[in-house]
Amino acid sequence: MDKEAESLRPGTVIKRHRLSTRVWHWVNFVTLIVMFMSGLMIFNAHPRLYWGQYGANPDPAWLEIGQRNGEGYLRIGEASVNTTGVLGVWTNDQGQRQAWAFAGWITIPSGYSLAEGRRWHLAFAWILGFGLLFYMLWSLANRHIARDLHIRKREWRPSHIWRDIRAHAKLRFDTGEPGTYNILQKFSYIGVIFIALPLMVLTGLTMSPQMDAGWGFLLDLFGGRQSARSIHFITCWALVAFFFVHIAMVILAGPLNELRSIITGRYRLPDRGETEERA
């Protein structure tokens, strides 16, 4: 057995995540939670979304969260569902009924304050934007993108993608060779790093009147400030969905080992049997 094969034997502890990846991961974890919760407070000030250049009064909202006759509702297009106790109308810990779109326990601040919500949101937006820029540049410099995230020709084959989908459905995961991601991981990470997060930053800038004055092309790019707000909201919930899928995959793949790898960078290669036992 050569040295390389021996180094990949089950039980071997390898270096899996670079320091830059680990730092950016945890900074993003805190940043996105704060921005999500403060963003919901901002949404509470006007819980409706529009498409087009105008919004608000001239155009009908395509999404609305509110209350009618003491009952909460979520309306998307013509479809409406009762959401009393969850959205629109809910009861706080003092037993008082509130008529905000999102409950105080999931917003920052927990009491209604548009100004405070904006301060939290914009403060952490700087961390998100510059953190993303730094991570992209650093990943180009250390060839993390070219080496780990680049999708090779054979990986584009439908049979290869389908095989990976089937493996995930059966809860059979890769044994974790150093610096390798399967095709579904590459699709998801590329989607988050190069599509979702930049989209959040750019649509956020589009909603700023000051940025519109200097970068008017953003309004044309996203079809107006109200359309940018809708895209911002949809992308936000796409990131929330990614977060829960990501957590589920960590738990199914072995939480202690996976958590250690993203904290210390060290990962213990599991036995093939360990992954099959979870199927």
Image (cartoon, grey):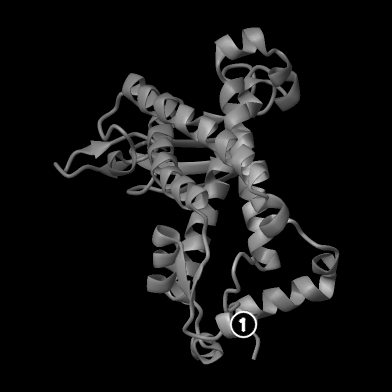
Look at the picture and state if 201 lies above or below 277.
above
In the image: residue 81, left or right of residue 79: left
Look at the picture and state if 83 lies above or below 271.
above
Q: Quadrant of residue 153?
A: bottom right
Count of residue discs? 1
For the point 32% across and 48% down, the residue is 85
Q: What element carries label 1?
A: helix
Look at the picture and state if 43 lies above or below 270.
above
Q: In which quarter of the image is the N terminus?
A: bottom right
The residue lying furthest to the left in this view is 94
In the image: residue 113, left or right of residue 33: left
For the point 60% across and 77% down, the residue is 174
Q: In which quarter of the image is residue 177?
A: bottom right
Q: Would you say residue 78 is visible in this rendering? A: no
x%, y% of residue 252? Answer: 47, 75
Q: Would you say residue 238 is visible in this rendering? A: yes
Between 267 and 132, the one lying in front of the other is 267
Q: In which quarter of the image is the C terminus?
A: bottom right
For the point 76% across and 75% down, the residue is 162
Q: Residues within 10 Å of mark 1 (few under 14, many from 20)?
A: few
What residue is shown with label 1?
Answer: 3
Between 235 and 250, the one lying in front of the other is 250
For the point 19% across and 39% down, the residue is 96
Amino acid tagged 1: Lys
